């Protein structure tokens, strides 16, 4: 086991397998949760362990790059060993924003890896079929995201909360992760956009840089753990 002091990163193992690598981003502050949501128990297993196991057990995925907070590196290392995450190749210290953390993960992509999946660590219920659909679509497009159709009526409001208009929802979707990108094009998009710290997902960067992005069908179970109410919802799906 080697530690790179300048990057606060652990190289755990090398997993030889065909497929696409995935960057799992788990470096957020969990400010809305009040505690580290990645380590909260969901059915007796930490949220991040559920997420890691989903990609560990997906044949489409070749290896896992985990991006986490500096203070959580050792905990994540022990957790990955406990749950036998054999595809884990790197644990990398994250950045000040989500996109900075993704960039840290991208630094561990090998030259022969043309595509990569990017997934939120706090989405522990992602299904194998969704992961595979994103990876398959990535063979034909520069950027792919899974998404679900919006069920609620959407209204546009002003700063005072006054309704301006009702937005037709037929063509509206809520995007999820994993998202997939072609590495070369994604790096070009980051350079073209400059400061990407305000972007909340990866396909938004690709869109802004002019690359074609597509959606594949996601799952309403693929929720993101943000508040304690989400833990209860995720548990109901899990059961």
Image (spheres, rainbow, N blue to C red):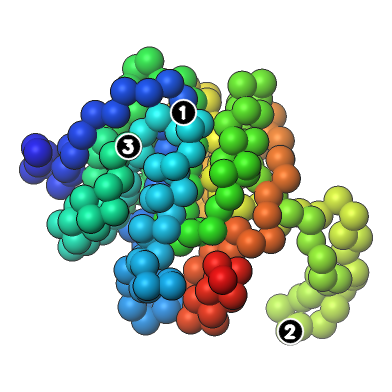
How many residues crowd around disc 1 within 10 Å: few (fewer than 14), some, or many (20 or more)?
many
Q: Which residue is drawn at the image coordinates 90% and 55% (left, top)?
A: 170
Tell me residue 206's x, y (percent): 59, 35
Sequence-wise first label, 2 or 1: 1
**First along the sequence among labels 3 and 2:** 3
* Residue hosting label 3: 87
Look at the numbered disc 3 and give the secondary structure of its residue: loop
Position of the N terminus by quadrant: top left
Q: Is residue 212 left or right of residue 21?
A: right
Circle 2: element type: loop
Q: Quadrant of residue 149?
A: bottom right
From the top left corner, tell me how far across and down residue 161 is, in percent. Answer: 76, 83
Q: CA distance from mark 3 to mark 2?
A: 49 Å
Which residue does the numbered mark 2 point to in the structure image? 160
Distance between mark 2 and mark 1 Cα atoms: 46 Å
Residue that carries the numbered disc 1 in the rendered image: 20
Please rate how many residues cluster around mark 2, counting C-alpha atoms within 10 Å: few if below 14, some from 14 to 19, many from 20. few
Q: Is residue 234 left or right of residue 39?
A: right
């Amino acid at each position: 086991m080697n530690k790179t002091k300048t990057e606060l990163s652990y190289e755990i193992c090398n997993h030889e397998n065909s497929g696409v690598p995935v960057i799992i981003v788990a470096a957020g502050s969990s400010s809305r949760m009040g505690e580290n949501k990645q380590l909260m128990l969901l059915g007796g297993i930490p949220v991040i362990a559920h997420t890691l196991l989903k990609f560990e057990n997906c044949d489409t995925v070749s290896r896992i790059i985990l991006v986490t907070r500096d203070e959580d590196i050792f905990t994540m290392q022990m957790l990955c060993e406990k749950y036998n995450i054999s595809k884990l190749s790197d644990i990398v210290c994250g950045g000040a924003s989500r996109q900075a953390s993704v960039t840290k993960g991208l630094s561990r992509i090998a030259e022969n890896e043309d595509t990569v999946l990017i997934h939120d660590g706090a989405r522990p219920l992602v299904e194998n079929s969704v992961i595979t659909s994103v990876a398959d679509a990535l063979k034909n497009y520069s950027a792919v995201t899974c998404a679900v159709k919006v069920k609620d009526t959407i209204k546009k409001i002003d700063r005072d909360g006054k309704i301006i208009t009702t937005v037709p929802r037929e063509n509206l979707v809520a995007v999820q992760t994993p998202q997939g990108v072609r590495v070369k094009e994604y790096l070009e998009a980051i350079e073209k956009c400059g400061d990407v710290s305000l972007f909340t997902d990866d396909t938004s960067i690709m869109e802004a840089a002019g690359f074609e992005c597509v959606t594949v069908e996601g799952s309403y179970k693929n929720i993101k753990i943000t508040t304690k109410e989400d833990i209860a919802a995720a548990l109901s799906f899990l059961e």
